[in-house]
């Protein structure tokens, strides 16, 4: 699978711009602020309908515009397909494949997988629990067909229940109306996250060639639907005072243990950066092993690696269907990326 081109309209700093890709490895080079990362972000959004930089869709819209459009031509087994995403505001989205509307996002995101490697990945190991949840949620959303739907249904029910809890004039019993939906989807999410933690840890240790990393899924939620409903009912009064639902997938965390010690508390800056990279490399390798088309998006992360780690990283990414890199200057003649297609920006 290759991406032949991507056309952007009112996306970030691009009012209208088309990029054509002829290589399996593509380097976008130019000064900071030229829009290199925005191209990678658009490819990522075309893959999973999420940005790897922000949770807010509005941030992706060109200033002063109401929405954006991304059109990508991908080639599978020599046959081209045109993928289109049109986003208006934060809540209206139109998806199409070869001009035919696609009503379900879970269907659209099965076309190809994109894995982004960015400097912000360090937060997976060093940051708060939300960064780790985002990492695992994004991986599970493209590997488990039912996961994304369960996560979306859970999120919608959670927002409605929290709105009731925040409203002092609402009848507290009204929160119970959303609890069956919360419980039904939470008990689908929990075992998938727990199994994913085990699989990712196994793959990281394979890449490390040593059994060094352990990932434990930490949750206070009951695994059974009946127990989950019981806990929601028991906590309702307490949660009214907090104005939010106090437990569930939105509060859970993943404990990363390296060589028997919690990585976040005892890891050096170098270990935190490197293990975040290995987590992303593991996700990439698992997607590739599953036979899905995989595109690697490398946003200015190779510069901080030593020559050995950089060589290992680039060797792994050569198994991608296609790889995109951002650099401030074109690679030198002896660089492993010297033969890549070069697109200059700025």
Image (cartoon, rainbow, N blue to C red):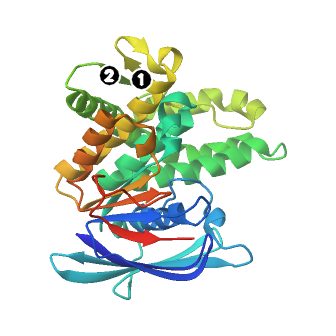
Residue wearing tag 2: 213
In the foreground, 243 or 269:
269
Q: Is residue 279 above or below residue 54?
A: above
Q: Are marks 1 and 2 in contact (CB under 8 Å)?
A: yes
Residue wearing tag 1: 256
Residue 67's label in the rendered image is none
* Residue 217 x, y percent position in the rendering: 40, 27
- Name the residue at 44% across, 43% down: 303
Task: Locate residue 100: give its quadrant.
Answer: bottom left
How crowded pointer 1 is (Cα within 10 Å; few <14, some 14-19, many 20+) is rated as many
Q: Secondary structure at mark 2?
A: strand
In the foreground, 148 or 214:
214
* Residue 332 x, y percent position in the rendering: 36, 56
Which residue reaches farthest right? 169
Quarter of the image that includes the N terminus: bottom left
Looking at the image, how many numbered discs can be counted on the residues? 2
- Name the residue at 68% across, 44% down: 162
- Name the residue at 77% across, 43% down: 166
């Amino acid at each position: 699978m290759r991406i032949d081109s991507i056309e952007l309209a009112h996306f970030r700093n691009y009012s209208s711009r088309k990029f054509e890709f002829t290589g399996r490895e593509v380097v976008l080079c130019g000064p900071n602020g030229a829009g290199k990362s925005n191209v990678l972000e658009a490819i990522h959004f075309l893959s999973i309908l999420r940005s790897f930089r922000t949770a807010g869709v509005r941030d992706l819209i060109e200033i002063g515009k109401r929405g954006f459009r991304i059109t990508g031509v991908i080639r599978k087994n020599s046959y081209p397909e045109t993928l289109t995403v049109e986003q208006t505001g934060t809540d209206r989205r139109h998806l199409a494949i070869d001009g035919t509307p696609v009503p379900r996002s879970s269907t659209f995101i099965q076309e190809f997988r994109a894995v982004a490697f960015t400097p912000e990945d360090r937060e997976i190991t060093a940051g708060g629990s939300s960064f780790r949840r985002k990492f695992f949620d994004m991986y599970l959303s493209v590997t488990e067909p039912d996961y994304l739907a369960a996560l979306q249904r859970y999120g919608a029910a959670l927002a409605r229940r929290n709105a009731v809890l925040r409203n002092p004039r609402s009848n507290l019993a009204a929160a119970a109306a959303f609890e069956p939906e919360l419980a039904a989807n939470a008990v689908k999410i929990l075992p998938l996250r727990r199994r994913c933690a085990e699989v990712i840890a196994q793959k990281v240790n394979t890449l490390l060639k040593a059994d060094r990393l352990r990932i434990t899924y930490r949750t206070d939620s009951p695994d059974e639907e009946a127990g989950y409903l019981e806990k929601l009912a028991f906590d309702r009064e307490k949660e009214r005072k907090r104005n939010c639902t106090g437990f569930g997938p939105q509060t859970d965390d993943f404990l990363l243990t390296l060589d028997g010690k919690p990585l976040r508390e005892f890891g050096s800056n170098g270990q935190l950066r490197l293990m975040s990279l290995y987590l992303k490399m593991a996700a990439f390798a698992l997607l590739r092993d599953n036979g899905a088309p995989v595109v690697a998006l490398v946003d200015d992360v190779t510069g901080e690696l030593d020559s050995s780690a950089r060589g290992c990283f680039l060797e792994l990414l050569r198994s991608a269907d296609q790889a995109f890199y951002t650099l401030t200057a074109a690679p030198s003649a002896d660089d492993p990326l010297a033969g890549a297609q070069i697109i200059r920006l700025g």
